[in-house]
Image (cartoon, helix red, strand yellow):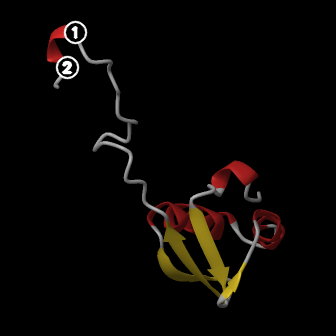
């Protein structure tokens, strides 16, 4: 079992031994991982942090989005009602 491209989101920056890696490089590396190692990697990329898999140190930083509410939804911009316009 290997990682899939959709497992790695665009808001994640992943370093392997302090070098930036691409999705394709991670997928190729994951071909040598056992199933528990792969599950551990998937859990860790969701939360971020520093960890080791197969003697390779990974550091995952996740770009947080400020435009989302507490439920992860985009804000709803409703048009103003005619009586609510300020002058």
Q: Residue 79 occupies which quadrant of the picture?
A: top left
Q: Position of residue 48 (x, y in %)?
A: 47, 70
Q: Which residue is the site of mark 1?
A: 82
Q: Residue 71 occupies which quadrant of the picture?
A: top left
**Is 50 positioned to the left or the right of 41 in the image?**
left
Q: Which mark is residue 62?
A: none
| Quadrant in which the N terminus appears | bottom right
**Is 82 positioned to the left or the right of 22 in the image?**
left
Q: Position of residue 12 (x, y in %)?
A: 58, 64
Q: CA distance from mark 1 to mark 2?
A: 6 Å
Residue at far front of view: 87
Q: Secondary structure at mark 1?
A: helix
The one of 66 and 83 positioned closer to us in this rendering: 83
Q: Secondary structure at mark 2?
A: loop
Residue at far top of view: 82
The one of 13 and 42 positioned closer to us in this rendering: 13
- The residue at 74%/53% (across/down) is 5
- The residue at 35%/27% (across/down) is 77
The one of 87 and 70 positioned closer to us in this rendering: 87
Q: Which mark is residue 85?
A: 2
- The residue at 79%/73% (across/down) is 29
- The residue at 42%/54% (across/down) is 65
């Amino acid at each position: 079992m290997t990682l899939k491209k959709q497992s790695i989101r665009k808001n994640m920056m992943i370093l392997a031994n302090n070098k930036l890696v691409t999705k394709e490089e991670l997928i190729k590396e994951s071909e040598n991982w056992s199933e528990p190692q792969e599950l551990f990697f998937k859990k860790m990329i969701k939360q971020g942090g520093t960890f080791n898999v197969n003697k390779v140190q990974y550091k995952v930083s996740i770009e947080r989005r400020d435009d989302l509410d507490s439920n992860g939804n985009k804000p709803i911009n409703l048009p103003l009602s005619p009586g609510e316009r300020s002058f």
